[in-house]
Image (cartoon, rainbow, N blue to C red):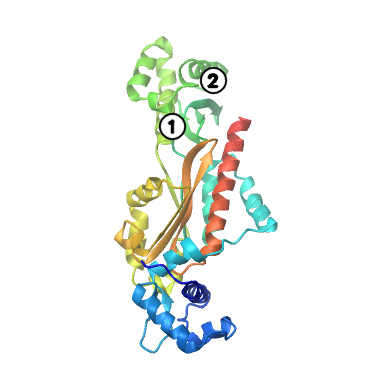
Amino acid sequence: MAQLTERKQLILAIITERYIATGEPVGSKAICAQMGNAISSATIRNDMADLVEMGYLAQPHTSAGRIPSQAGYRYYVDNLMTNYELGIDEQARIKIWLQSFSGEPDKLLEKAGSILAELTNCVAVSTSPSDAEAIIKRIELVPLSKNTAMIVLLATSGILKSAVVRSDTEINVDIAEVFYNICQTYFNGRNVSDISIPFIQTLVASLGDKVFIMSPFLCAVADLCEAVKNTEVHLKGQNNILNHPELSEDAFGLMGFLHRGTPLENMLTSHKNPLNVAIGTENTYRELKNSTTIFSKYSVGDRDSGSIGIIGPTRLDYAHLIPTIRYLAGVIGSLLTETLDNE
């Protein structure tokens, strides 16, 4: 698209920001007043007509004002928007909300999603840390009762996974010690991708008379390693879709898209940039043709581990939402990294 003059950029910015704030088309008189009546309404109307012809504005009705098109939003986000900076109090509030969940990645992401859905009135989506190259840092057996125990696995990607295992044999100190020694010898320090069923079968065959006691615990470890490699998608605020009239025609399709799982997971894991903003038809899936998606990656240690962001209408307060989502992703990464470093 053609480059815009400084005046046309200002007009596009005013229309976009007023439409985001009010949801109403913006007319030349409102623009003229905001520009201090320094330019005539006729001149502004001519510039608005040019912006419509160039594809940056749309006119919902013949006598109505203008609203930004998808291309207009994109130009605004890329060239005109001034990013809002979160205040110290806002930053502290987000950290306090999340810190109590820092040792539990899944609960941390669920809480972060709830916060984001409430702050944005959009659907919040996040992916759990996942890494096929993660190394097993530690595995513990925690007795829960006479015949049940919890197996807890911590990986270097910041992922903490657990499973409850039932044993036909009483779980005593001797069994816990045997399990600990097996983990020290065969699991800790090994890549999760190495822990396959054939690996477990070979290990079990070497256990002699302990095979029947250890088998359920070792199979649980294999399942946990598989879970570490896989991505889990967390959704919060799905009903927020119904709060946006712009999405009323797409609501049924959007709900279906959110609950299909795989397309959503593919969308979150395929973007390569630290921050991704896709507006309308820039989104790959047709169900999102009238939506905006904003996702930010978070890192555990020095590795990209997952993403968090929103799905909402194209009429969004981009200047506030983008830095908020970026900051939230940074806090998640810091908390997960801190947990990993303290283990």
How many marks can you see? 2
Q: Nearer the viewer, residue 101 or 310?
A: 310
Which of the two residues, 306 or 21, is positioned nearer the viewer here? 21
Query: Does any portion of residue 313 appear in the rendered image?
Result: no
Compared with 49, 202 (above or below) is above
Can you give x and y, in whole percent of width and height, for residue 6 in the image? Answer: 50, 72
Q: Residue at x 40, y 15 (%)?
A: 211
**Structural distance between the alpha carbons of marks 1 and 2:** 18 Å
Above or below 17: residue 202 = above
Residue 60 x, y percent position in the rendering: 37, 81
Quadrant of image for the C terminus:
top right
For label 1, count other residues whose C-alpha is less than 10 Å away and answer few (under 14), some (14-19) or many (20+): many
Label located before the other in sequence (1 or 2): 2
Visible residue check, residue 279: yes
* Camera-nearest residue between 251 and 143: 251
Comparing labels 1 and 2, the label whose residue is closer to the camera? 1
Residue 190 x %, y %: 45, 22
The amino acid pointed to by label 2 is Ala
Instruction: Give neighbour class at mark 2: few <14, some 14-19, many 20+ (Cα, 10 Å).
Output: some
Say if mark 1 contacts mark 2, CB within 8 Å: no
Residue sitting at 51 percent across and 60 percent down?
Answer: 117
Q: Which residue is mark 2?
A: 176
Q: Position of residue 281 (x, y in %)?
A: 33, 63
Quadrant containing the N terminus in the rendered view: bottom left
Q: Which residue is at 39% across, 23% downward?
A: 194
Q: In the rendered structure, which amino acid carries the disc numbered 1?
A: Leu
- Residue hosting label 1: 224
In the rendered image, the vertical position of residue 174 relative to residue 286, given as above or below: above
Front residue of this view, candidates 162 and 19: 19
Label disc, if present, on residue 1 of the rendered structure? none
Quick one: SS at disc 2?
helix
Q: Among all residues in the image, which is located at the extreme left? A: 286
